[in-house]
Image: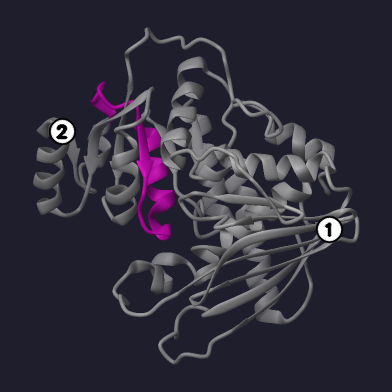
Amino acid sequence: MTVDRRSFIRSASLGMGALLVPEYSSSPLLRPPGKKLGIALVGLGNYSRGRLAPALEETEHVRLAGIVTGTPAKEKEWGERYNIPAENIYNYDNFDEIASNDDIDLVYIVLPNSMHAEFSIRGAKAGKHVICEKPMATSVKDAEAIIKACEDNNVKLQLGYRLLYEPNTREFYRYAHENVLGEVRAVESSNAFYAGDGWDNWRFHGELSGGGPLMDMGVYSLHAVRHVMGTEPVSITAQSFNVRPKFKTIEETILWQMHFDNGVIANCMSSYSARVGGIEVHADRGTFRLDSAFGYGPVIMYANGEFLNIRHTNHQAVQMDAFAKNILNDTPVLSDGMEGLKDMKIIEAIYQAAKTGKKVMV
């Protein structure tokens, strides 16, 4: 069934507040002031090291309380650096014991895509609230299993869609939803980087990543288009190709078109052999775009060529604080499990369309 624009925007607006307003929530916290929730990072790769851990030094409502890693050397390094007690340090085998640790309230799954479902479900069964990085899983079936596990264990689930909380991105969506420059007529959204060395990285191995650039950066492009349009696409067409011989188990470049019931077609691309990261919307009275749209900041917005000087935030800190407030106030989550599930359905349709050369209904 097609979800109309009004229903999409209404459902996306629950929890932290509508995308159309600048602040998420002014309601008081239920937990006493000064008491932060404890989070455990599950997986200590580049994103945890370079973004999440530093962001947790800026957060108001959540603190780094524990870690989960398969590398003993990281246990010592992180324990000393962040003053993490030994009883809050876990590995992938004893992770389930986190259930008895009252110092840890939530877990952030920062593992290869193929491991998202297992550890999100284990975290939920341990009674911990869950943040899962995107893409949510490597299949719709696994995404649905994560949602069910969180519901069954009465814990909240947030997907790592940090840009839903980012001020420039929120203003960009407002331009589309309120027809600031008229009706949206066409959308272009691309996200890519040039992969040189470093082929030992999990993202270049299909059994761990679940795919190529679509399962890495492409999810940003399709997610942004969904929120610009305020509705779900009705069908997908797609093409993929490989040029460099090193790409054997995953696609090197993928292009896809998201067809909407009002006739608008969004053209999207993701690649490991290009350098781009932006989204542009063409409307009746002009064009508005985000440059560096999917990076860690600053995101830059232009409307008809005019730079809009909108504040920059630490994406990860704002995202995690928002989730902490959802937990503390028992409010709905803006970037909830359905966001991840809807994207997974589109991702599966894109791969099917690229493989068959045929239009696929979503």
Compared to 149, does 191 lie above or below? below
Nearest the viewer among 52 and 312 is 312
The residue under label 2 is 84
Tally of numbered discs: 2
Reply above or below: 231 against 40. Answer: below
| Distance in Å between CA atoms under marks 1 and 2 | 49 Å
> Quarter holding the C terminus?
bottom right
Picture coordinates of residue 153, whole percent (x, y): 46, 28
Residue range corresponding to the magenta coloring: 99-126
Q: Nearer the viewer, residue 278 or 273?
A: 278
- Residue 115 in the magenta stretch? The answer is yes
Describe the element under mark 1 as helix, strand or loop.
Answer: loop
Q: Specify few, some or many for label 1: CA neighbours under 10 Å numbering under 14, 14-19, or 20 or more.
A: some
- On screen, residue 135 versus residue 89, left or right, reads right
Q: Amino acid at mark 2?
A: Ile
Which residue is pictured at 29% across the width and 33% down the height? 57
Query: Which mark is on residue 62?
Result: none
**For marks 1 and 2 on the same chain, the one whose residue lies earlier in the sequence:** 2
Along the line of sight, the residue nearer the viewer: 72 or 287: 287
Spot the residue most to the front: 306
Q: In the structure shown, which secondary structural element does the residue marked by tag 2 occupy?
A: loop
Disc sitting over residue 260 in the figure:
1
Q: Report x, y in % for residue 102.
A: 26, 21
Per the image, is 163 magenta? no
Q: What kind of colouring is applied to the model shown?
A: one colour
